[in-house]
Image (tube, grey):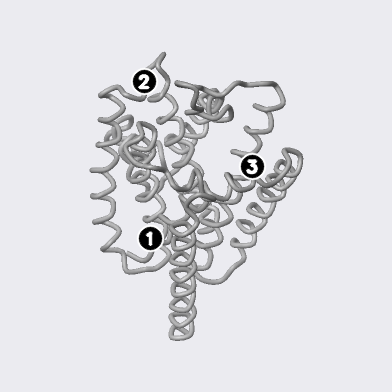
Amino acid sequence: MASFFLVLFTMPLGHAMMMIMDRVMTPTAVHYAGFMMGFVGLFIVVAGVFAKGDTRQTLCGLFGGLLFWTGWVEFLFQYYANRYGTQPEVVDGVVVTRPEYLILPATFGLWAMVMTLYIFCTRTGCNFINWWQRLFFGKHKAEIVVRPMTRHVSIVTFMELNMILWTSYLALMFCYDPHFIGDHSPVTFLVGFGCFVGSIFMFRKELRLASWGANIRMAIATVIVFWTPVEILGRVNFFTEIWIQPERYKGPMIAILVAFLVLLASLTVVAVRNRKVKQ
C-alpha cells in the first residue's frame, strides 16, 4: 500500500509542478530549468547504478526517471512545439490538449523501435513483454531470447518508468484523436476500463511482493496503468483535475505533498533499518 501510494502521489505532484513552472516562470526560464531537470534526473539514475541496496537503486531509478521524463521529454516537446508554432487542440474555447502532446504520437516509430529491442533481444520479468514473446515465438522463445541485459536496478526502473509512460501517452493520444477514435468513443472508455481492471490484478500481485525494491517497481507499472482511466475521466470532465490548477486547490495539493513526503521518509527509514539488520 505504501509503495502504491508513494508512486501514485507523484502523478498529481508532477502535473502540478509543470503547471506552476509554466505560470510563474518566463518561457525561456522554463526551458532552461526543464533541461537542467532532465540532466539532474539522468545523473540520479546513473548514480543509482553505484548505490548500495535494491531499494535505494529503485528509488534512484524512479525519481531520476520522473525528472528525466519531465525535463528531457515533456519540456523539450513543449519547447519545440512553441518554437515552431504548433497550435493546441481547442474545444468550445477551452484548450483540451496542449501542443506538445499533439506531436507526441509522431514518436510511435521510435517507440516501436525500442519495443522491438525488448521483445526480440531481451529476457525480462515484464509480463507484458513476456506475453508478446510467447505470442511471437511460442515454444522457440528460449532460443530467440537467450539472456537478459546487464541488470542494474536503477536503469531497469528508469527504463520501466519511461517505457510505460511513453506507451500510456501514445495510447491516450491515439484514443483522443478524432481521426482515429475520439475521446468520447466507447472504445476509449473500454480502454480506460480495461486498464482499471488490469491495475487491480497488478495490485494483487504487488501485495505478494515482500521486497521493498520489487514492490516499488511493481507499483510503478500498477500506478501508470491505473492512472490511464483517471486521465480519460478527467478529459471528459467527469471530475475536476485539481493538479491542473494547483493555485486554486492549494489545500488538497499540499495534503498530497505532505502525505508523499511522509511515505518517502517512512520508506527510507525502513530501508535503512533493513540494511542494518542484514549487516
Quarter of the image for residue 61 reads: bottom right
Task: Kindly tell me whether residue 54 is visible in this rendering.
Answer: no
Q: Is residue 41 above or below residue 137?
A: below
Residue 89 horizontal side relative to residue 8, left or right: right
- The x, y position of residue 28, in whole percent, is 76, 39
Cα–Cα span, label 2 and label 1? 31 Å
Residue 84 horizontal side relative to residue 8, left or right: right
Q: Earlier in the sequence, mark 2 or mark 1?
A: 1
At horizontal 49% and vertical 68% (from top left) the residue drawn is: 261
Crowd class of label 2 (few under 14; some 14 to 19; many from 20; radius 10 Å): some
Secondary element type, mark 1: helix
Mark linked to residue 5 = 1
The residue identified by callout 2 is 182
- The x, y position of residue 21, in whole percent, is 64, 47
What amino acid is labelled 3 in the image?
A: Asp
Mark 2–mark 1 CB contact (< 8 Å): no
- The x, y position of residue 97, in whole percent, is 50, 28
Cα–Cα span, label 2 and label 3? 28 Å
- The x, y position of residue 209, in whole percent, is 31, 64
What amino acid is labelled 2 in the image?
A: Gly
Q: Earlier in the sequence, mark 2 or mark 3?
A: 3
Which of the two marks, 2 or 3, is nearer to us in this view? 3
Mark linked to residue 22 = 3
Crowd class of label 1 (few under 14; some 14 to 19; many from 20; radius 10 Å): some
Q: Is residue 1 above or below residue 36?
A: below
In this view, the residue in front, 196 or 106, is 196
Mark 1–mark 3 CB contact (< 8 Å): no
